[in-house]
Image: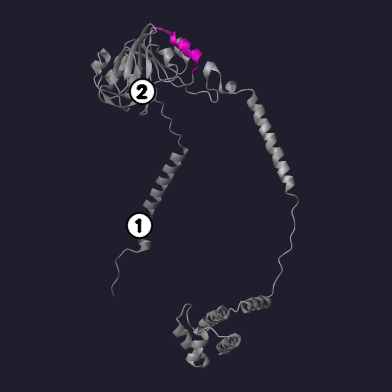
Amino acid sequence: MSVSTSPTTGSLWRAGRFWIALGALVAVTAIIGVALAPGAREPRRLDPADTSLEGSKALAELLRGRGVTVDRVDSVEAAIAKGGGRLLLVTHTAYFDWQQLDRLAQLQGDRVIVGGLDGLDVLAPGVTPASGSARVRSREPECDLPAARAAGSARLGGDLFRGANGCYPGEKGSTLVQAPGGGGTVTVLGDGTFMTNQYLAEDGNAALALNLLGTKPAVTWLVRPDQPPTGSLAGAGGKSLGELVPDTVPWAVLTACLAVLVTAFWRGRRLGPVVAEKLPVVVRAAETVEGRGRLYRARRARERAAAVLRAGTVDRLTPRVGLAPGAGQHEVVAAVAVRTGQDARQVGGALYGPPPADDAGLVALARYLEFIERIVREH
């Protein structure tokens, strides 16, 4: 007597149920941890406090390592409170109105503006935007600016400008332009990708950033507000969106709503009450058959009437003689002839023969078809 030594399902379950339960516990714990964990913070581009790939925490630490004080501010008031004589780095102006930008432009000292921001003509009066843009890639300085020549190639691109000194040129302008202004030097950059944590270590990006921002003992780094105002983005003249909407717009909207209500009421009354209709007349099957027969007789459609009679008889006889739907003529004729005891040629002529020549032939065909169908049904 031989005994099987192969493991069975029960033995495998008993041996591995501990590890299966342990794996399930770990998976559930991981899922719960991910579900309850706070969402990842949105990257803040060129923010000296952001450690993501889009942030500039690495550059801020390099400046502090060289003895430069880096103060992060997110409002014009905070930047003005830091005072002049410092380098002002502006990376965002979308939430500041023109009056605030005018006050910011009065600060004396060097400025670095990143991108074609709103209010560029106020903050950098000696720099004008050029048409088009350039792809962000590694570029050579191709200028005599000491900060750029010492850094060499850097990842520049974006908006194009024209000014006194242009470096890292594109097709119709330069991606880095420097001009005098604000009691110091104004530097405008088409893009600030080279200052982000992701690309700071490539090419001469770090050297260029330190050469531009390390000219003063302190940097005021103006970034996007941590909590930007919602629905009150300042427009021209310092007015909010609600203030820019004409006074007649609310009345126009109210009038349109009243017109829609009146039109709906008017059209609804024109439809009138619901009309109850009686059910269609019920026609008995015998009357339907008689009516169709009269139509065939009026049109002398003996061929059509014979085809309908034969098709109906074949459809009813086929399952009764044990044949599948769609059986061939020879099979049907042979099976019906065997079941009824009739001559196969007579049965074939009745089921698949030529159309009758007159009404008497049509009546005789109908009677014979009824006869063989009755025999099959009874036997």
- Badge 1 marks a residue whose secondary structure is helix
Q: Identify the magenta region.
A: 96-108
- Image mark count: 2
Q: Which kind of residue does numbered mark 1 sit on?
A: Ala
Q: For residue 168, which numbered disc appears in the image?
A: none
| Structural crowding at the residue carrying mark 1, measured as other residues with C-alpha within 10 Å and reported as few (<14), some (14–19) or many (≥20) | few
Magenta stretch: includes residue 6: no
Magenta stretch: includes residue 105: yes
To which quarter of the image does residue 60 belong?
top left
Image quarter where the C terminus lies is: bottom right
| Structural crowding at the residue carrying mark 2, measured as other residues with C-alpha within 10 Å and reported as few (<14), some (14–19) or many (≥20) | some
- In this orientation, does residue 190 appear? no
Of the pair 265 and 135, the residue shown nearer to us: 265
Q: Quick check: 145 above or below 191? A: above
Residue 345 percent coordinates (x, y): 48, 91
To which quarter of the image does residue 126 belong?
top left
Say whether residue 291 is left or right of residue 135. Answer: right
- Gap between marks 2 and 1 measured at Cα: 52 Å
- In this orientation, does residue 36 appear? yes
State the colouring used for the structure image: one colour
Of the pair 375 and 201, the residue shown nearer to us: 375
To which quarter of the image does residue 276 belong?
bottom right
Of the pair 156 and 7, the residue shown nearer to us: 156
Residue 164 percent coordinates (x, y): 32, 11
Q: Which kind of residue does numbered mark 2 sit on?
A: Lys
Image quarter where the N terminus lies is: bottom left
Q: Which residue is mark 1?
A: 15
The residue under the point 55% across, 25% down is: 231
The residue under the point 41% across, 46% down is: 27
Q: Between disc 2 and disc 1, whose residue precedes? A: 1
- Badge 2 marks a residue whose secondary structure is helix
Q: Which residue is mark 2?
A: 57
